[in-house]
Structures are given as C-alpha cells and as structure tokens.
Image (cartoon, helix red, strand yellow):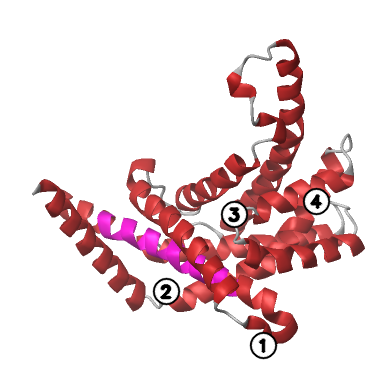
Amino acid sequence: MAAVQKLMQAIRILRRALGRFGRKNAWVLSSHIAMSMMMALFPFVLFTVALSGAIASLFSHRVVVDDVVDLVFGSWPQSVAEPITREVYAVLETSGTGLMTLGGVLALYFASNGVDAIRIAMLRAYGQEETRPFWKHRLISLGLVIMGGAGLLLTAVFELFLPLGARFVARFFPDLDFLRGWEHGANGLVVAVIPVAAVFLYHLVLLPRRETVRHILPGAVVTLLLWWAAGTGFALYVSSFASYSATYAGLAGAMAALIFLYLNAAILILGAEINGVLQTDRLAEEE
C-alpha cells in the first residue's frame, strides 16, 4: 500500500508540474532555449578549441579538437550529431584558434546567451525574481561557459593520458583486472557524467536564491531519465521514420538538432517545475 501511495503522490506531482508547465507557456520558452543553445553551440566549440590552443600546446591540435567535439556531442544520438559535427569541422578548418581576438570574445559572449536562456527558465520554474544586477548574472553565464570549455579540455587531456597510464602500469602488473578496458580511455563514462554535471549546475548556480542539492535532486533525476529516453526515442524516430531531408533539404541536419534541443529544453523546464511544486508544498507545510 505504501508503494501505491507513493506512486499516486508522484503522479499528482507530475500532473501539477505539467499544469504549471502549460500555464507558463514553457513550450515557447523551450523554443527560445533551443534556438539560443543552437546559436551558442558553434561559438562554444570554437571557444573551447581556442582555449585548447592557448593552454595545451604540448598536444597536437587535431587530437584535442577531435576529443573536444566527441565530448560535446557524445551524448547526442548519432543520427542527430553526425551532420552537425561535419559542419563544426568545416568551420574549424577555416577559423583561427586565437583566444583573445574579437572573434574569440564574441564567441564567448554568444555561447553565454544559451546559458542565460536557461537561467530565465530556472527563475520562472522556481518562482524567483532576478535580484542580481545584469553584469553579475551575465558574468555567471560567462563563467559557466569558460568552466565548461576548460572542463572539456581537461577531460580531453585525461582521455589522452589514461590509456597511456593504463598500458604503463599493466607492463609491471599484468594480472590487475581493473586495468583491462582502460587502454581505450573512459569516453563513455565521461559522456555520461557531463549531462549530470550540467543539470546540477543549472539548478545550483543560475538561481539568485540557492537551493540545496536535496531539494533539486528529484527534478534533476527526472530530467536525466527523460533525457535518456528522449535521446533513444528521437534517434529511433530520425533513423526509421523521419524524412527531414525531403522537407528541409540541406537544413535537415540543423532542423533535427534544433528539434532535439527543443525536446531537451522542455524536459529541463519540466524537471525544474517538479522542484517548484515540491518547493510550494514545503512552504505550505512550514506555514
């Protein structure tokens, strides 16, 4: 009976969250986030590559670029990511890697617009008002972009050293079973960690009034589970049923990526609305 009661309570919370989602025109906000993230995607990769050129001169340029692109798009369905990565490489072939250039500064600013769109969604979901000055919340968005680029770069370097270290240790301790499989790096593990880190950072850092990890955990878990389900389902849909090339011609890859981002943005807002419902219940109990 207890399990049934918890299930019914979860269904009621989900229904209330969906109601809040609809009343706040979250589908419109999702399209804003998707477009902002799509416009920020190329500048973010360019900024990260420029950052790698500035602080990773010990490694070959191509290896770092490949690793960064794989990490950025590793959690995307392959059928969605493939046409986008082709365009990314085409842009990288003709763009410079200077970090402190006008192009680098603009890339950083435009990439932060995607984070700022998510900030607006978080504010509306949690029922908070922006009390920080413009420069402060913009600096937070810029800081998240820089931290994301540096994190991807460090991860790419880690992916380069991990197989070498595993092979070196295996030469002296060939019977250690835990070293098997690490010769090819841990890209799959890292790709799984990146969305988790992103969701928690969005909920923890972008709000003017910080929430605890315990309070954001339910919506974050729902977001990650629905992201996984949406990625699997959308990949199946694109590969089996969709015919974007017949409708959008050369823009088919971009449109598939935009719709994928749109679904992910809606799921992110829904997860935040679930936390908003739970927050409303807590405040009601305290009164």
Left/right placement of residue 182 relative to residue 207 reads: right
Left/right placement of residue 145 relative to residue 19 reads: right
Of label 3 and label 1, which has the lower sequence position?
Answer: 3
Q: Which residue is mark 1?
A: 246
The image shows residue 33 at horizontal and vertical percentages of: 55, 69
- Residues under labels 4 and 2: Cα distance? 33 Å
Of label 4 and label 3, which has the lower sequence position?
Answer: 4
Q: Residues within 10 Å of mark 3 (few under 14, many from 20)?
A: some
- Residues under labels 3 and 2: Cα distance? 24 Å
- Residues under labels 4 and 3: Cα distance? 19 Å
Amino acid residing under circle 1: Ala
Q: Residue at x 64, y 31 (%)?
A: 181
Which disc, if any, is residue 49? 4
For the residues bearing labels 2 and 1, Cβ distance under 8 angstroms = no
Furthest-bottom residue in view?
247
Q: SS of the residue at dot 4?
A: helix
Amino acid residing under circle 4: Val
Which disc, if any, is residue 75? 3
Amino acid residing under circle 3: Ser
